[in-house]
């Protein structure tokens, strides 16, 4: 890897909101990235025209001006760096799976039976993102195969059929924010989401779907970095990088008997997504 590629790689993950990069047992903190990049600059042999990496941004000390002095015209901010390619070059689902390996990066590995990587069409124009595996998924290694999964299948296939769109569940891709079952099906913790989210992001970038459907608040939080609830976010397009995201209710929530209104709204959301992607 050239120095420029390493810099782009680090900036790319920083840009994704990833604060920690794991590589063969070591963890690099995002706060350390500027220093790391500086270290890399000094470690790598200088080339004919060494591409300098911007030093860490440090807030300048405040300057006071006497009334007679005119403050200098504001210095325009430097232009944004050239667009970093959305997918690390050559990344594939196979490479992501290999990198996950027999993952021990967070505490969720302790109680899991199977890592649930994701399933479906890896070239799909539509990806659904759930929260994390439940008991059935942990046992089978496949996402959304339990009760919530059956409802999700019905939602996808039922809505598509009604709308005259010829797709079945295997035509889309389905993955979760965390790939190992949280104990007692609790909500994944922020550090678990951050660690495992790196792999979800890589999956999304490798697939590059036309749209993403985020199922529930954990998926919404992981993709949009917002604390806003599903009720507020749903129904309108959001964005993860340049990819449109529709947030809707998690199927487990829709399984609760008193959520008839939410069910209707979820069907509306799904209709919107399917027409956007397949029309
Ligand atoms: N709930 C999820 O969020 N994901 C699954 O895979 C199953 C249930």
Image: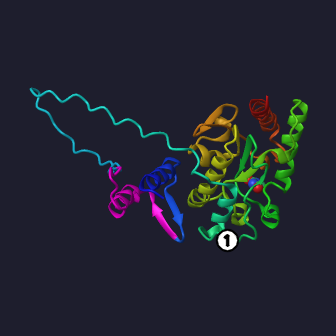
Label 1 CB, ligand 1: below 8 Å? no
Q: Is residue 42 left or right of residue 97?
A: left
The picture quadrant for ligand 1 comes to bottom right
Q: Is residue 263 left or right of residue 202?
A: right
Measuring from the top left, give residue 9's x and y in whole percent: 49, 53
Residue drawn where x is 34% and y is 37% of the image: 78
Residue 30 drawn in magenta: yes
Residue drawn where x is 58% and y is 51% of the image: 89
User: In the image, is residue 223 above or below residue 269?
Assistant: below
* Number of numbered tags placed on the structure image: 1
Residue drawn where x is 66% and y is 48% of the image: 204
Residue 263 drawn in magenta: no
Q: Which residue in the structure is indicated by mark 1?
A: 102
Q: Secondary structure at mark 1?
A: loop
Q: Nearer the viewer, residue 3 or 13?
A: 3
Measuring from the top left, give residue 132's x and y in whole percent: 71, 57
Residue 228, image quadrant? top right
User: In the image, is residue 151 above or below residue 140?
Assistant: above
Q: Which residues are magenta?
A: 26-51
Residue drawn where x is 76% and y is 30% of the image: 272
Of the 4 image quadrants, the one containing the C terminus is top right
Q: Name the colouring of the figure.
A: rainbow
Measuring from the top left, give residue 82's x and y in whole percent: 45, 39
- Give the class, few, some or many, for how many residues have Cα within 10 Å of label 1's Cα (few <14, many ≥20): few
Residue 44, image quadrant? bottom left
User: In the image, is residue 116 above or below residue 225?
Assistant: below
Measuring from the top left, give residue 96's x and y in whole percent: 65, 59
Q: Is residue 215 left or right of residue 256?
A: left
User: In the image, is residue 3 above or below residue 60?
Assistant: below
Residue ranking furthest to the front? 48
Q: Nearer the viewer, residue 192 or 86?
A: 86
């Amino acid at each position: 890897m050239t120095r420029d590629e390493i810099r782009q790689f680090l900036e790319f993950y920083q840009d994704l909101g990833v604060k920690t990069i794991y590589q063969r047992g070591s963890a690099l903190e995002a706060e350390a990235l500027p220093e790391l990049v500086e270290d890399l600059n000094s470690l790598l042999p200088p080339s004919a025209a060494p591409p300098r990496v911007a030093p860490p941004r440090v807030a300048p000390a405040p300057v006071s001006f006497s009334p007679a002095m005119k403050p200098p015209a504001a210095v325009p901010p430097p232009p944004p760096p050239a667009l970093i390619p959305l997918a690390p070059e050559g990344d594939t689902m196979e490479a992501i799976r290999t990198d996950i390996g027999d993952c021990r990066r967070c505490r969720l590995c302790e109680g899991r039976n199977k890592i649930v990587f994701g399933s479906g069409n890896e070239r799909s124009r539509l990806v659904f993102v759930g929260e994390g595996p439940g008991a059935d998924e942990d046992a089978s290694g496949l996402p959304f195969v339990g009760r919530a999964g059956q409802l999700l299948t019905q939602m996808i296939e039922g809505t598509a059929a009604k709308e005259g769109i010829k797709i079945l569940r295997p035509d889309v891709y389905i993955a979760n924010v965390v790939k190992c079952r949280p104990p007692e099906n609790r909500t994944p913790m922020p550090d678990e989401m951050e660690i495992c989210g790196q792999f979800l992001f890589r999956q999304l970038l490798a697939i590059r779907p036309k749209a993403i459907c985020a199922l529930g608040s954990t998926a919404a939080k992981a993709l949009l970095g917002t604390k806003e609830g599903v009720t507020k976010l749903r129904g309108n397009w959001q964005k993860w990088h340049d990819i449109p995201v529709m947030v809707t209710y998690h199927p487990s929530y829709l399984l609760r008997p008193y959520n008839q209104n939410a069910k209707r709204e979820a069907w509306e959301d799904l209709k919107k997504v399917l027409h956007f992607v397949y029309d």
